[in-house]
């Protein structure tokens, strides 16, 4: 196990050393790592430092400590570590905007997956969500209702990575609701007056008609307030 002793912390050095050990030994999920004592002796670092480095790998889901089996390499849950720190109050406006941009890309690009997997049961589930939505102003609903609708879309897409990534978008829903009157209501009013506002009920019509191209364009218009917020508000 190699170590590069530089200006980084001891824990960082051990973390890097463990990563190199995994790569050099071609370890895969189910393989064993040396125990804390062995790693400590190989790297000449105290067990406390090794233990802290290993805790980082556990947090990322890359290792597990199992009874009678020791430290085992595991397949990490992609993006799971991010979900633990995505409190909208801790995110800068720049980060919020970048996440909004990713949501636009995700929601408009997911149409192929959505219509490939869509079933009549899925349509019924989506209609049930829309029917119980309680509108709050123009094209504005509770966080719970809007999240439920879009989460169902991601679920139908049938891609686990997309579903995990979509869960990271929750801060965007919260930010939009908390700042609706300041930033998004004026945009929605203008779109409504021009007959360009696309609601969830409008999206449902394209879904029921199995109109993939129409849905993609409708979703783009549905997210127009996000797009304008990205480029018209310099916060």
Image (cartoon, rainbow, N blue to C red):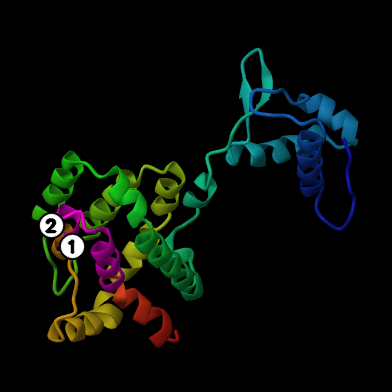
Determine the secondary structure under disc 2. Answer: loop
Using residue 204 as the reference point, say whether residue 75 is left or right of it. Answer: right
Determine the secondary structure under disc 1. Answer: helix
Could you say which is closer to the camera, residue 144 or residue 28?
28
Q: Nearer the viewer, mark 2 or mark 1?
A: 1
In the image, farthest residue toward the top: 68
Using residue 210 as the reference point, say whether residue 172 is left or right of it. Answer: right
State the residue position of label 2.
133
Measured as percent of width and height from the top left, residue 98 is found at: 48, 70
Q: Which mark is residue 182?
A: none
The answer to whether residue 106 is magenta is no
The reply to whether dot 2 and dot 1 touch (C-beta < 8 Å) is: yes
Measured as percent of width and height from the top left, residue 141 is found at: 18, 64
Could you say which is closer to the camera, residue 168 or residue 210?
210
Picture layout, residue 70 above or below residue 135: above
Residue at horizontal 14%, vertical 68%? 136
Using residue 54 as the reference point, say whether residue 185 is left or right of it. Answer: left
Using residue 164 as the reference point, say whether residue 222 is left or right of it. Answer: left
Crowd tier of the residue under label 2, counting other residues whose Cα lies within 10 Å: few below 14, some 14–19, many 20 or above: some
State the residue position of label 1.
200
Residue at horizontal 50%, vertical 75%? 94
State the image quarter where residue 140 is shown: bottom left
Measured as percent of width and height from the top left, residue 193 is found at: 13, 86
Placement of the N terminus among the 4 image quadrants: top right
State the image quarter where residue 232 is shown: bottom left
Of callouts 2 and 1, which one flags the residue occurring earlier in the amino acid sequence? 2
The answer to whether residue 219 is magenta is yes
Residue at horizontal 72%, vertical 23%? 32
Crowd tier of the residue under label 1, counting other residues whose Cα lies within 10 Å: few below 14, some 14–19, many 20 or above: many
Magenta-drawn stretch, dominant element (helix, strand or loop)? helix
Region rendered in magenta: 206-221
């Amino acid at each position: 196990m190699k170590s590069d002793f530089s200006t980084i912390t001891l824990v960082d050095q051990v973390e890097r050393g463990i990563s190199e050990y995994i790569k050099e030994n071609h370890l895969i999920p189910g393989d064993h790592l040396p125990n804390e004592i062995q790693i400590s002796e190989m790297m000449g670092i105290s067990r406390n430092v090794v233990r802290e480095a290993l805790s980082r790998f556990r947090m990322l889901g890359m290792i597990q400590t199992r009874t009678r089996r020791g430290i085992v390499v595991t397949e990490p849950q992609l993006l799971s570590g991010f979900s633990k720190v995505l409190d909208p109050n801790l995110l800068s406006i720049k980060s919020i905007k970048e996440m909004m941009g990713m949501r636009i890309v995700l929601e408009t690009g997911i149409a192929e997956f959505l219509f490939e997997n869509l079933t009549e049961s899925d349509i019924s589930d989506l209609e049930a969500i829309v029917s119980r939505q309680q509108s709050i102003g123009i094209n504005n609903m509770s966080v719970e209702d809007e999240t439920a609708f879009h989460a169902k879309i991601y679920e139908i897409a049938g891609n686990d990575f997309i579903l995990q990534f979509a869960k990271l978008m929750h801060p965007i829903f919260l930010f939009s609701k908390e700042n609706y009157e300041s930033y998004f209501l004026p945009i929605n009013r203008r779109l409504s007056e021009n007959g360009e506002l696309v609601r969830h009920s409008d999206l449902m019509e394209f879904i029921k008609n199995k109109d993939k191209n129409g849905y993609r364009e409708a979703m783009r218009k549905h997210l127009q307030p996000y797009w304008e917020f990205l480029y018209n508000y310099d916060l």
